Image: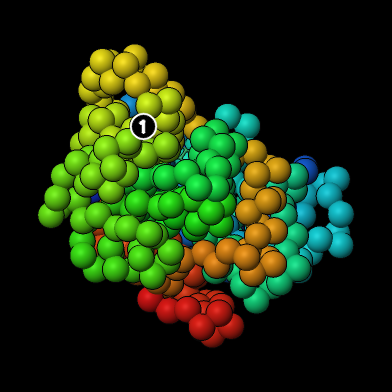
Amino acid sequence: MTATATMQAAVIRRHGGPEVTEVEELARPAAGPGEAVVRVAACGLNHLDIFVRRGMPGLPIPLPHVSGGDIAGWVDEIGEGASPELIGTAVLVDPAVGDGALGETLPGGLAEYVVVPVANLIPLEDPDRLVAFAALPIAYGTAYRMIVTRARLAAGETIAILGASGGVGVACVQFAKRIGARVLACTSSSEKARRLRDLGADDAIDVLEEDFSAAVWKLTDKKGADVVVDYSGKETWPGSIRCTAHGGRIVTCGATTGFDATTDLRYVWRRELNILGSDGWTRSELLDVVGLVARGEVDPVVHGVYPLSRVTEAIAQLEERRAFGKVVVVPDAVYGQVTEKEGQHE
Ligand SMILES: NC(=O)c1ccc[n+]([C@@H]2O[C@H](COP(=O)([O-])OP(=O)(O)OC[C@H]3O[C@@H](n4cnc5c(N)ncnc54)[C@H](OP(=O)(O)O)[C@@H]3O)[C@@H](O)[C@H]2O)c1
């Protein structure tokens, strides 16, 4: 147990743009009954952190707030009722707590310490890959549920993935290739398209250069994709509907560009389309993902690792659509120790 009374944290005191996030000293939290304090080694960023900072209609966030749901670290303290043997263990945290999540409705891991229900701790056998594990829960957990559980993607099927360079996007590409599907990755630059091909995509479409829907239609000999993954929402949804095959599935977990998207219902009935919603992950799905990474069968794509003091720069990678894969933040006090082990830097 450490004796520090304060900790560095990225604090949001009001909703707004990047300027409202300040790295400052906060009181170090303490563990209540059934809880643990985790010393954060790495915290993966998600688009959710941007939505939380901006404020989401219908989801009040108690302010001041610390976001960051994807946390890997070491158990530093445990509360009443938990096993003291956990102290010092390297863990991944399942961010789903009740109806909310750490970093969303509860304080998150963009800090040196975070309070976590003991039931959400996933002990890790490999303590030297904490950046890789911190890249997983929200993006890879959600992608796994979309591709495996909801869309039930099968070998030999064709899948089109919109926003393929993002955290959820690269995970979808990796899971779809593992299954043996033909992957058409849609992205916003030729450089990202090249990297998606390197990651295994069979074709990559630059959406700023061509109409992705027409391109998918052409690449599938006018049959359409069996599965389309679209969490970009308003801007892409009409095109996604048009390029889905007869009897195909469109799966969504979000709407980065707006949720008031237009659905041309003629396509839905004539092509007998199946629109599938997918929200989060189950513990069992997350454990499947952790197992794939622990066995070296999936290697999470990490765009860069930033010290907590530069968290605004790190979030800008997502907000300005520059990231390829996951951006991970590491507290300054352990930055050298953590990044050296994994050979990862910004
Ligand atoms: N329901 C759930 O449980 C759940 C869980 C995780 C994520 N989500 C949702 O899934 C979406 C993706 O999340 P993420 O964390 O993977 O985000 P991310 O890492 O920021 O990636 C989003 C990708 O979408 C594309 N994009 C399209 N329009 C964009 C815009 N205006 N600004 C930024 N990127 C844009 C970009 O890819 P290209 O440049 O390749 O086009 C970008 O890389 C979000 O809407 C998020 O809320 C939902």
Identity of the residue drawn at 43% across and 30% down:
249
Q: Looking at the picture, how far across and down is residue 294, in whole percent?
A: 68, 66
Q: Looking at the picture, how far across and down is residue 184, in whole percent?
A: 35, 51
Q: Looking at the picture, how far across and down is residue 267, in whole percent?
A: 28, 20
Outermost residue toward the front?
221
Tell me the quarter of the picture where residue 325 sits: bottom left
Out of 229 and 90, give the one closest to the viewer.
Answer: 229
Identity of the residue drawn at 63% across and 32% down:
98
Residue 75 visible from this viewpoint: no
Residue 241 visible from this viewpoint: yes
Identity of the residue drawn at 51% across and 83% down:
343
Identity of the residue drawn at 23% across and 34% down:
239
- How dense is the environment of label 1, judged by Cα within 10 Å: few (below 14), some, or many (20 and up)? many
Out of 254 and 229, give the one closest to the viewer.
Answer: 229
Is 229 above or below relative to 130?
A: above
SS for dot 1: strand
Residue pointed to by mark 1: 245
Residue type marked 1: Ala
Is 233 above or below relative to 165?
A: above
In the picture, the quarter occupied by the N terminus is: bottom right
Out of 266 and 94, give the one closest to the viewer.
Answer: 266
Horizontal side of 210 relative to 320 (left or right) equals left
Q: Looking at the picture, how far across and down is residue 59, in whole percent?
A: 41, 28
Horizontal side of 171 relative to 93 (left or right) equals left
In the picture, the quarter occupied by the C terminus is: bottom left
Outermost residue toward the left?
209
Horizontal side of 69 relative to 187 (left or right) equals right
Q: How many marks?
A: 1
